[in-house]
Amino acid sequence: MTRQVYLDDLGIVCALGSGKQQIAERLFQGYGDSLSSTSEFTFGSEVTLGVVKEPLPSLQQFPASQQSRSNQLLLAALSQIQLSLDAALAGVPSAKIGVILGVSTSGIREGEEAWREYFANGQFPESYSYELQEMSAPAEFLAEQIGADGPAFNISTACSSSAKALASARRLIRHGICDVVVAGGVDVLCKLTVNGFSALDSVSASPCVPFSRNRSGINIGEGAALFVVTGERGASQSSVTIAGVGETSDAHHISAPAPDGRGAIAAMQQALDDAGCSAAELDYLNLHGTATPLNDSMEGLAVNQLFGSQLPCSSTKGYTGHTLGAAGAVEAGFGWLTLQQETLGISSPNKLQLPVHRWDGAMDESIPPIKLVSRENNRVASIERIMSNSFAFGGNNIAVLLERVQ
């Protein structure tokens, strides 16, 4: 099965901003003011989180069963791709249109607010609908908005969820089940995730510093990213394809990755093999880079073993926080922007930019050397292929390789 699958357009909103232009400019300049210190989710103790600050669409015209922050984020991302999506959907039967999303929270935030009122007043608010918390709710909502009658489902494999949504969309296109798929991910901040990760001693009170010897944990974030996925090339001057995917499960531990990196290495190698390219042909790697001690040590070892110490790479979670179920799509979105920056008018030939790695510069010398992108070394002459890593609980690993085609 060799049919190319294209990512025609991207809608994205996260703590770094909203829309391709704003996010790309901030990503490449190393913007340092996107994370927020707040006690909203932690009962008085402040933590640093990736809060979406952009105004979001109102849902007052929708039924209570659809009034969630997840759906607000999805509508914000959808509005950015509407023109491209309309063009892609022209003449396509509704049964050949799919929606595949990665998510881990769905409507849990609204459920928390409803239970708070229940405990205070003895009843749930009239506006609350338990349907909001169904894991399938975001995909069903989005399918309704775009008129999709094909496959519509959510994938929930923790931090690899929305990267797997892209892989699933690719399979649906390649096998002729769908002609167009809107694929990506969405997740929102809520007390369950912030306090749950805090209970695991995985949350940093200050901005995270991936691969630093001073790293102390993640910052949870929220956001949404949606791609128009097709088997036909869009109207843009250059296009991006999902050239390779590698999916593995090392099942080492319920929350810790296999420390020797075997699952990560296998996923990255599979993605290279699937794309028909060598490690030397990759131009940039977006690291999973959570800033937890175990993840960074494992990933650094895996990257060094497969690519050596000269492949430019960076973690972008210092801009967004860890957006959990949305992380794979958000970070694939950063890769898409990296490949499309000339088309978007962000950079000129021979002055292309790579996402800057935000941290304190104190490399953990116990991690094998890798080349982290800085403001001083983020300009390159060409970028043709990038890879994005996502590693989840249970040793669920995925690497997605994107390629720019002229």
Image (spheres, grey):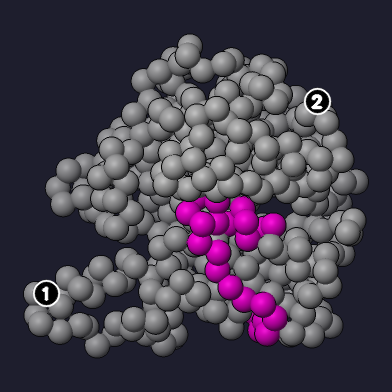
Would residue 315 appear left or right of 402 to someone viewing this image? left
Instruction: State the residue position of label 2.
Output: 280
- Please determine whether, in this image, residue 172 is positioned above or below residue 368: below
Q: Quadrant of the N terminus?
A: bottom right
**Is label 2 in contact with label 1 (beta carbons under 8 Å)?**
no
Secondary structure under tag 1 reads helix
Dot 2 crowding, Cα within 10 Å, few <14, some 14–19, many 20+: few
What's the magenta region?
145-167
Q: x and y percent of residue 122 in the render?
A: 10, 82
Q: x and y percent of residue 251 in the render?
A: 52, 45
Instruction: State the residue position of label 1.
Output: 119
Q: Nearer the viewer, residue 233 or 31?
A: 233
- What amino acid is at disc 1? Phe
> Which quadrant would residue 331 be assigned to in this image?
top right
The residue located at (74%, 85%) in the rendering is: 94
Q: Nearer the viewer, residue 226 or 168?
A: 168
The answer to if 88 sits in the magenta stretch is no
Label 2, label 1: how far apart the Cα atoms are: 58 Å
